[in-house]
Structures are given as C-alpha cells and as structure tokens.
Image (tube, grey):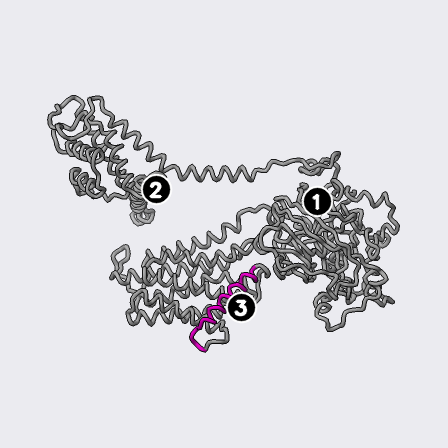
Amino acid sequence: MTGRRRLGLVAAAATLLAAAPLSAIFESWTWIAQCVLTVALIEGAAMATRTFRFPTWAQALSMTLALVLALTWLFPSGKEIIIPTPDTLSHFADLVRQAGEDTRSYGVPVPDRDGLLFVAVLGVGSVVIVVDLLTAVFRRPALAGLPMLAIYSIPVAVYLDSVPAIPFVIGAAGFLWLLVADNVDRVRRFGRRFTGDGRDVDVWEPSPLAAAGRRIGVVGVLVAVVVPLGVPTVTGGLLTQLTQSNSGPGGNSGTGTGRINLFASLSGQLNQNATVPLLKVTTDEPEPFYLRFAIADVLTENGFGHEAPRGRALALGLPDPRRAAATRNADYTEYRAELEITKDLQQNMAPVYTYPTVVDGLEGPWAYDEKQQVLYSNRFTTRDQKYTFTYMRAKYSPRLLQQAAPLPADDPLRAAYTATPGDATVDATVKRLITGKSSDYDKVRAIYNWFSKDNGFRYSLSATTTGKASEIAEFLTNKAGYCQQYAAAMAWMVRAAGVPARVAFGFTRGSQTGPGTYSITNRNAHAWTEVYFQGFGWVPFDATPSTGVTGSARGASNWAPDVDRPAPTASASADTGEPGPDSSADPGAANGENRANADGGPDADTGTVTEQTDWTALWIAAGVALILALLLIPALRRVLVRKRRHAATAPAAPTVLAAEGATDLTVTAESGQAREDAHAAWDELIDSMIDFRVPVDPTETPRITTQRLIRDLSLDGEPADAATLLGTAEERARYARTPLQGAELTAALRRIRSGMSAAASARTRLRAALLPPSVLLSWRLGLAEWSTRTAERLTGIRESLTRFNPRRLLSRSR
C-alpha cells in the first residue's frame, strides 16, 4: 500500500476518534454507526481514485459524491432508488430545518432525531474529506487539526458545564496518530535511518528520536487533561450550599457562581455565608407563591435528582392549563409578573411562577418542558435577563381534591413517579399514617400533617447521622432538617403511599421592597413537594416548618395549611419577608446577629445589601490591556531600532541627496564613523525590505540589490535616488579606501521606505507596522542561537561528568 493511501486510512480513523465528543450529545450510539459507514464509503472512493492516479480535483469530487450517496441511503426521502434526485435535496433541506428546531427544543443528551443525525453525519463526513485532502494530498497534517477541533467545539458550545475529558483524550490520540503516520511516511520516502551512534535502523524499528517524540506527545496530552482538573475553581452555587451531594442523576456539579445543584439530598450540612442579590420580581398577585425553575423526579436511596428537560421552542407558544384535561378542574386566576435577574444568577433554567402562558423579553432560544413545567435553554443563561410573563395561579378545593380518582395502576405517570428504592422505616411509617384513608388526598394530607412540631419535627441547619440506618430513616428518626430534606422525605413517603410525587426547586417570596415588588437573594432558595392528582395536575405541598423559611407560603393555601399554625392571624401572616430565628433563607442569623454583616450580607438594621466591588470587569480590562501590550512589543522594538539607526546616520556635514560627485569627497577624521553610519543605514534598508516582503539575497552586492529594488518596485524620482545613494554609501564603506561622507542617509531611508510602502498592499503595510517580520526573524535567529549554545553547554557538562564517573575511580582503586 502506498503512502498516500495509508495516510488516507489513518486520516479517516483519526477523524472518527476526533468525533468521540459527540457521544456526549446523543443518547444512543446510532450516530457512530452511521458515521462509520459514511467514512468507509468516502475513504473507499479516495483509495480507488488514488489507485488509478486520478488528479486531485477528481479525488475530492469522488469523496463528495460518496458522501452524498451515503446520506441518500441513510436518510432517504422515499422517492429515489440509489441516485439522489431533486426531491432528495429538498428532503435534506427539511432535515436541516428540523435539526435547527430540535436544537432549540431538546436538551442534551438528545434522542435519535433524523435532523440531528443528518447534521452529525454530514459534518463528520465533510471533516473527513478535508482532513484526507490536507493529509494525503497536500501533506499538511498539522492543519488537519483545525477541522478536527471543530467537531470537539460542538459539545463545548452546547454544554454549560465542563465537557468530559475522556473524549478529548481520544480525539487528541487520533490527531497524534495522524502526525506520527505522516512523519513515518516522510522518513521512509527519504531513505535509510540511523541512530545517534551511527547504527542503521530498520524501516519498522522506531528510532530514538521518534520514541522521544511519542513520549513528549503522550505527556503533553496528559498534562493538558490533568492540569485543568487540578486548577481550583470558584464555587458558590445556591443549592450547592444546601447539600453535600455534588452530583445526581442528570444534575450538575453545582460549581460556578449562580448554578443550582438539583439534587435534594437527605443528609448534609447547611452553610451559607454571604448574601447575594439574585433577582427582583414585580407582580400584580396580592399573595404570590414560590418562583419555580426546576424539578427533581429521579429517586435514589440518597435523595431526588433531576433529568435534563426536553420540550418545544418557546416561540411555538405555551399550554393553557384551563384547556388541558389533566389540569382543568382547578380554579385559575391570571396575573402578570416582571423579573429582573442580576449577573450572579447564571443558570440555564429561568424562574417563573407556575403555569406561565406568555413569556416576553427572554434573549436567546428558550424552550418549555410541559412535563416538568420548566423554562430552559441549552445555549443561554439567566444572567442579566429581564423578561415579563403572564401566568395562571391555580387554587385547589380540598373537597374536590378529595374526590379526585386515583390514577390507574398501568398509567405511565403513576409507574414513573411512584417508584422508590424501598426502605423499611419509610414503609412502616407510611402504612401507619394512611391506615383508614381512602382517597389519595387524604393519604397525602395524613403524611403532610405528620411533619409538625407536635410530632417533634423542627427546623435545623444540620442533620446528624449515626450511619446505622438509611439517610431517610435517620431524618425521620431525628426529625430535624432543612427544606430539601423535608421536601425529599415527603415526596418519598407520598410515593410509598402509591401517589405520584416529586421535588420542586425555586425561591420563596423574598423581602417585599414595594407594592408588589420583592427582592430575592440566595438565602431565599427553597425546595418543596409536588403531588399529582388526576384532573388537577401537580399540586404543591410545603412540609418545611414556616418558622425556618423566609417568605414561606405554607399557610397561604387551604389545601395544605400550616399545621403548626392552624389559624394564622392577619398580623402573623403579614410579616413574612423578615427572616426567622432559624431561617433556611437566612441561616446566618441562627449563628449570630452580626454574621451576615461580617460576610457581606444585609445590614441588620436597614436590611439593605452592602455594595461589593466587582473586580471582574477590572480584571478583564487589565487582561485585555496586557494582551495588547504584548502584541505591540514587536512594533515598539522596530521603532526603537529604527530610531537608533536614524540617530547614527544623521550627518554633521552638508547634505548630499544623490550619489553623483561622491568621488570628490575628501577623507576626514570621521571616516571610521562614516563607515558605521553607512552600515547602519544599510541594515535599516535590509530590515525594511524584509518588512515589506521584498526578497533579500545576501550574496548580492549593495549596488545589485538597490538596482533590483528599483526595478522590482518600479521606483523613480526621489525614492530611486535614495536607493542609489544607500547602495553607493554601503559599497564605498565596504570596498573603498574613503567612505562616503556628508550624505543625508536618514532622509534617504525615509524616502525609500515611503516608496516601498506605496508599492505594498494594505495587509503588508499593516503587518510591517504591527508585527514587523524583521523583528520576528531576529528573535527566531536569536532563539536558535541560544538553543545551540545551551545544547553545547549541556553536552560539555555531560562530558565533564562522564570523565569524573565514580566507577572509574573504583576501577582504578582495584
């Protein structure tokens, strides 16, 4: 097999390895099977054309046709047999449009949608063609890394959190394989190889240099993967502070400012330090419920986790709960709210009140998951967003809820939301509580009413565990915890009673700052339980003691009243914006009155938030200024060198602007300085030629160089005279007994530089000003010389150490 065909196969395999990050995008492996088939057809066409020595354009055309045929077979329109038709191309266009809609509607990982699979196969196939041509035809395998990197950039652009490291390692290994294969092929075509000691190396035997290169490549990839994992990151998510579990089914790690950890853990330690304003909400609802942004519905033995939302684009409209059979039995009232989110709340799920019907003002593509009732985006976050929405507030009658029929046993929703890991303590407690209860609502109320202070439950910032029982059993035994533990425990127990339940995440009302306006901080993060009733949908139940939650709405509903305050007075319910002595929204108050102020929280007397200096913009500006300064170093270096040379060429004698009559000049005491001035002017001319892309031949005499410069650039007038003067001055300085004195070389340099600038393109002039090639060339030569000298010194040190080898002393002593 020839080198080009071998490199083509390696290029195809390396591209497939570079496509490994796409595994984080799709749920199944259908895409990889289709990509392998497409790549095989493309590379087969390339090998066939190279076998018959077709020209380059024919090879590219054959691979493109193979790609089109593969797409036709994998994604047929139904109106073609083998060869694509105009209907096939229209079908491809529809698939691309479908992929655009799916990217706005689905969250990662996405299902096997034809549009998304088509785009993935088309992209990988196109990259294979480009990589094959760059590697096997143009012999530029290093450039092939750019289209391969484009594949890796897809999950980087989609994921808001860190991309998995293993796919990156696989893709990097493929790129290194491509570089090694090209290097081996070049060496084989060159001839025989030798080791450093002169020994001949077989064709298939790795040379010491190649082995060292592979080791360096492997170490480089490992460093690129391991070092970022060890770099400290900034933490401080909202509900990250509420749980010790930093991961969960479908949950994020919780790292990063303003990110929410959607894992309702049943054990842990609540620690909150600073108070951070997150959003301001204005609503015309007199007594608003909780703002809601996500749910957790995947139950494990440690608590509830969440799955990635999936839904339809927000532009397609939102469902009306009054028209849906699953929710039409509730009593709805329409309200309108406006949210203004700060830069500190950066997540891909937008807070809204339950049942939004119209949302305006959100920047970017957003989608609504009707099943989870969440508003989300795969590309944009809530940072600095300001939007308005209309929503329906549902009121539920306890009498009607009591009459709601249970879901059938074979209903998919009942099967999905009543599954539990099983726990003896939970099962026994639930069985005791629901004994004699006939309706689902009665069972839920029995469980809900049990979470009261009369039964020993209290709010606590910490949850102790002995390790002798499960986490939920420990909580139900100790009867002390915070909002996530109450929400998760109640949802688990309701599921054990056979009623669908899940955990919801959001914010309490916060502190009221004006008529209908509430300020919400990180201390207002909250979790509660949602229970499904047929004909009513998901009904909220907040089992957390109201004394521990700022802005609690536990007593605001008649279907789930505050069991600790059966008959709340008007004065007791009016002041819900201030934190209680043991508040989940303000745990700092439980540890001391001044803790919030010491940590940058709200002032104890005024309730205002201490303004903190935002150093992010300053650091960004400083970084940009530093980058610009580094980019301007070559230009500054060039200006300083030119200024020094101009100072050296400034004459003290009368001005001479032409070479005529130069032979009549007499030798003076400054002849030595005149030679140095001529050399400085000539060096400046050579650097200017390098800057303006004029070829320089070191073997030419100064006169021949200036004549070629005048001819190539079509110089005339003063620039031509100036070039002739500089050539004569350098020639006299090199070969004549008396150098040229009294010439105005500085003016000549300015004129010839103006002539070269006028003859050059705008891009060449810009590069000569910002990144002068003469400076970069001098730096490269200096670096090469320094490397050579360092290698010579190291060799000398090694030889010196070899002479004084201790083994020689021992052999002599014997």
- Element at badge 2? helix
- Depth check: 39 or 795 in front? 39
Q: Residue at x 65, y 35 (%)?
A: 611
| Segment colored magenta | 81-103
Labels 1 and 3: the sequence-earlier one: 3
- Residue beneath disc 2: 767
Residue 175 position by quadrant: bottom left
| Residue 606 spot, x, y in % from top left | 74, 34
- Element at badge 3? helix
Q: Is residue 451 magenta?
A: no
The CA span between labels 2 and 3 is 47 Å
Q: Residues within 10 Å of mark 2 (few under 14, many from 20)?
A: some
- Depth check: 715 or 805 in front? 715
Principal secondary structure, stretch drawn in magenta: helix
The amino acid type found where label 1 is placed reads Ile
- Residue beneath disc 3: 114
